[in-house]
Structure formats: structure tokens, C-alpha cells
Image (cartoon, rainbow, N blue to C red):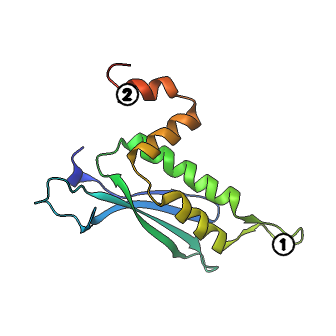
Amino acid sequence: MSNGSFTSFTERGEFFILEVEYMGEGYNGDYDSSDPEDEKLLRFTLYTKDGYQSYMNIGSVCTNITCDINLNYLRDYMKYLLKEIENNTKVTDGNSPQSYNEMGAQFYFRFNTDGLDNDVVFHTVAHNTKDYLGWLEDHFEEF
């Protein structure tokens, strides 16, 4: 897959939708194809239901994840992050249906996407799937 062919991906949870897409961003703002050190970077956006079955944006972060990331790792990371956001922001009072803490979700989302890059995604997915050897073999030729 070339950098230019990336399309958006979406994961849906009980309360949230997590989307990742390429929006023309690079390390210093807009991607600069004349800069050999610039790369096309992905943006994560978190949406939540607003009560009317439509969704509103509650956080968006440009990451250091490049468009050439392994898509299987990216999808697995999105599932992991969405599950973590939902599990760590649930609220119950015993009398009403389960809901979520929006400020907690925003904080958790930003905390887990700030500085996010390909290595963090690869390491997290490998760690969570207990696939250390496969990850090492994929990323280090001499292993």
C-alpha cells in the first residue's frame, strides 16, 4: 500500500466511534512532499452519541502514525483503544442505564493518542496478543 492510498477506518463501540484517517497532515502541519523527512500522518477522532442517535466529535488528535503502517496492527490497536476508553469511562448509579463520563473519555483518548506512533501501536498490539516473537521477527531481521 502506498502512502497516498490510505482510506479511513472506523471502529464502533457501545458509546463511541473511533475513526482514523489521513487528512493531509505531516510533522510540521500540512504534509510537505518536497521535504524528504516529512511523512503523511494519521489523525484519530473520537465520536459519541449525542442522545439523538447522531454522533458528535469529542476529541481529535494528529498522531505520529504514518500512512504506511501495517493495517492489521492499526485495526487491532483501534479495537484495543476503543475498548479501553469504554471500559475506563463507564458510569453506573444502580438505577439508570449504563452511561459514560465524557470528560473522562476525552482525557483517556488524548492521553492514549498523544505521541502515538507506529512503534507504540506495534508494541501494544504485540503485547496484548502475546505475540512477542512474531512481532520481533517482523521488525528485526537478525532476530
For residue 128, which quarter of the picture?
A: top right
First-in-chain label (2 vs 1):
1
* Relative image position of residue 49 (x, y in whole percent): 60, 73
- Disc 1 is placed on an element classified as loop
Q: CA distance from mark 2 to mark 1?
A: 47 Å
The quadrant of the image that shows the N terminus is top left
Say which residue label 1 marks.
96
Q: Which mark is residue 138?
A: 2
Residue 73 % position (x, y): 44, 41
| Residue 47 shown left or right of residue 63 in the figure | right
Q: Quadrant of the C terminus?
A: top left
Residue 135 lies in what quarter of the image? top left
122 horizontally vs 14: left or right: left
63 relative to 52 in the view: left or right = left
Q: Which residue lies at the image location 51% right of the left edge and 27% below the top edge?
A: 132
Amino acid tagged 1: Ser
Q: Is residue 24 above or below residue 139?
A: below
Q: Position of residue 141 (x, y in %)?
A: 32, 22
The residue closer to the viewer here, 119 or 45, is: 119
Q: Residue at x 84, y 72 (%)?
A: 96
Q: Residue furthest left?
A: 34
Residue type at mark 2? Answer: Asp
Q: Is residue 136 above or below residue 116?
A: above
Q: Residue furthest top?
A: 142
Residue visible at 62% across and 59% down? 85
Label 2: state its secondary structure: helix
